[in-house]
């Protein structure tokens, strides 16, 4: 069903529609805002991942057997 969901010509049509709807002057500002939001999201998920991991346990010291 979704085997060929997003082909290059789909992206071209989407870009043309965005240009018609938003205009060429607003698209760079919108792309900048999306990029900034993605950077914030990435930083927050990285912080959550490191926050959830328990601190590493100390390895037991090896004792001499001989």
Image: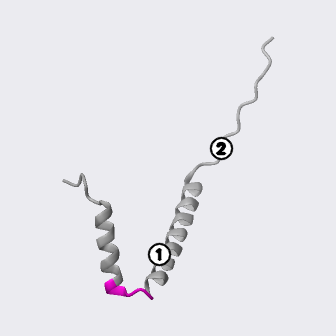
- Where residue 50 appears, as percent x and y from the top left, is 59, 55
- Tag 1, which secondary structure? helix
Marks 1, 2: nearer the viewer:
1
Is residue 24 in the magenta section?
Answer: yes
**Count of labels shown?**
2
Q: Nearer the viewer, residue 16 or 41?
A: 16
Q: Measured along the vertical axis of the image, is residue 23 above or below residue 66?
A: below
Asked if 51 appears above or below 37 in the picture, the reply is above
Q: Residues under labels 1 and 2: Cα distance?
A: 36 Å
Indicate the quadrant containing the C terminus: top left, top right, bottom left or bottom right.
Answer: top right
Q: Is residue 12 left or right of residue 29?
A: left
Q: Residue at x 45, y 88 (%)?
A: 25
Q: Which residues are magenta?
A: 20-25
Q: Which mark is residue 62?
A: none
> Horizontal and vertical percent for residue 62?
76, 25
Q: To which residue does mark 2 refer?
A: 56
Q: Position of residue 42 (x, y in %)?
A: 53, 64
Instruction: Say what secondary structure mark 2 lies in.
Output: loop
Identity of the residue furthest to the left in this view: 1
How crowded pointer 1 is (Cα within 10 Å; few <14, some 14-19, many 20+) is rated as few
Please give the residue where the numbered disc 1 appears in the rendered image.
34
């Amino acid at each position: 069903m979704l085997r060929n969901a997003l082909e290059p010509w789909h992206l071209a049509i989407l870009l043309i529609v965005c240009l018609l709807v938003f205009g060429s002057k607003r698209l760079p500002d919108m792309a900048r805002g999306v990029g900034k939001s993605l950077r914030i999201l990435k930083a927050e998920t990285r912080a959550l991942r490191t926050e959830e991991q328990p601190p590493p346990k100390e390895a037991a010291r090896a004792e001499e057997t001989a």
